[in-house]
Image (cartoon, rainbow, N blue to C red):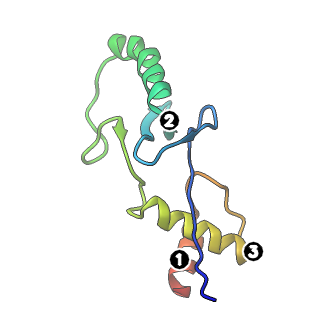
Amino acid sequence: MASRKITTYEYMDDLDGSVVEEGEIDTISFSYRGTDYEIDLKSANANKFDTVIKKYIDSARKVGRTRAGGGTRRTGTGSGRSREQLAAIREWANKKGYEVSPRGRIPANVIEAFDSAH
């Protein structure tokens, strides 16, 4: 009998933890007091974020962009790898004894170890 392994991935809203369909997640990048942040939100929560921050942006002074191709909103991953690839790295790392959080940035040494092993 033949068998096959099927892996599924769930995308989650960082604010409320709800599961979001692929392509419906919105990654928002922003800076506050010199620290850069990213948050993955479903459309409804992204709209709430936009509404709240708008009054501050409207009162703020705009400064030059510090990142090439900047903007405050982008989709996808910052590593240049797909979400599926990152999920595979997390799965591999956990099996190999690395401590990797279920979301957020994967440490460079873990990615390097994964690349070396593959």
Residue at 51% x, 86% y is 118
Residues tagged 3 and 2 counted as in contact (Cβ below 8 A): no
Label 2 sits on what residue type? Leu
Label 3 sits on what residue type? Gly
**Badge 1: residue crowd in 10 Å (few <14, some 14–19, many ≥20):** few
**Residue positioned most to the front:** 1
Q: Which mark is residue 41?
A: 2
Q: In which image quadrant can residue 70 be found?
A: top left
Distance between the alpha carbons at the discs numbered 3 and 1: 15 Å
| Circle nearer the viewer, 3 or 1 | 3
Residue 88 vs 28, above or below: the answer is below
Number of marks in the image? 3
- Label 2 sits on a secondary structure element that is strand
Give coordinates of residue 51: x percent, y percent.
42, 16
**Badge 3: residue crowd in 10 Å (few <14, some 14–19, many ≥20):** few
- Which sits earlier in the primary sequence, circle 3 or circle 1? 3
Q: Is residue 41 left or right of residue 92?
A: left
- Which sits earlier in the primary sequence, circle 2 or circle 1? 2
Give coordinates of residue 66: x percent, y percent.
31, 42
Distance between the alpha carbons at the discs numbered 2 and 1: 28 Å
Give the labeled residue for mark 1.
112
Residue 118 vs 63, above or below: the answer is below
Q: Which mark is residue 99?
A: none
- Label 3 sits on a secondary structure element that is loop
Q: Which mark is residue 97?
A: 3
| Circle nearer the viewer, 2 or 1 | 2
